[in-house]
Image (cartoon, rainbow, N blue to C red):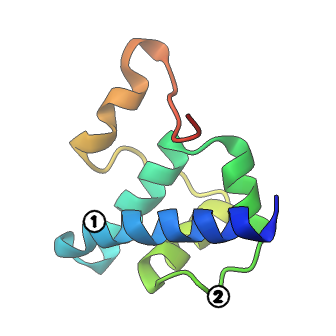
Amino acid sequence: MSKSQLETLTRFANQIAKNFVAIGHDKAVLATADHIESFWDPRMKQCIFTGDRSGLDPIAAQAIEQLAQGAHPGSQTRATDFSKAGGLHNSDAG
């Protein structure tokens, strides 16, 4: 992926993390990782796992690091439950 695509994914990850800030750092990391694991296309994940992560906010950075190391946070919020409805695995990739 290109530099602009990585910048877009970094912005997306930071926005996801900001949505979970109110639940506390550790839970926000897990919820961010859950969202990315549940909704991002494998190509998106691979790009952010292997790309420059210096632009990631602390919560997003920790979530990405955990996923890159093979962690599977499991469902953390009801907001991600629908991704598994009907056996489908939807993604943010459109």
Mark 2 secondary-structure assignment: loop
For residue 67, above or below residue 28: above
For residue 80, above or below residue 34: above
Tell me what residue is drawn at x 35 percent, y 58 percent. 31
The quadrant of the image that shows the C terminus is top right
Query: Mark 2 = which residue?
Result: 54
Tell me what residue is drawn at x 59 percent, y 39 percent. 93
Left or right for 56, reference 86: right
- Considering every residue shown, the one lying at the far top of the view is 86
Task: Determine which quarter of the picture holds residue 71.
Answer: bottom right
Left or right for 82, reference 39: left
Q: Position of residue 68 (x, y in %)?
A: 68, 63
- The answer to whether residue 73 is seen in the rendering is no
The answer to which of marks 1 and 2 sits earlier in the sequence is 1
For residue 86, above or below residue 12: above
Tell me what residue is drawn at x 70 percent, y 61 percent. 5
Q: Position of residue 27 (x, y in %)?
A: 29, 68
What label does residue 19 carry, if any?
1
Tell me what residue is drawn at x 72 percent, y 68 percent. 4
- Name the amino acid, label 2: Ser
Mark 1 secondary-structure assignment: helix
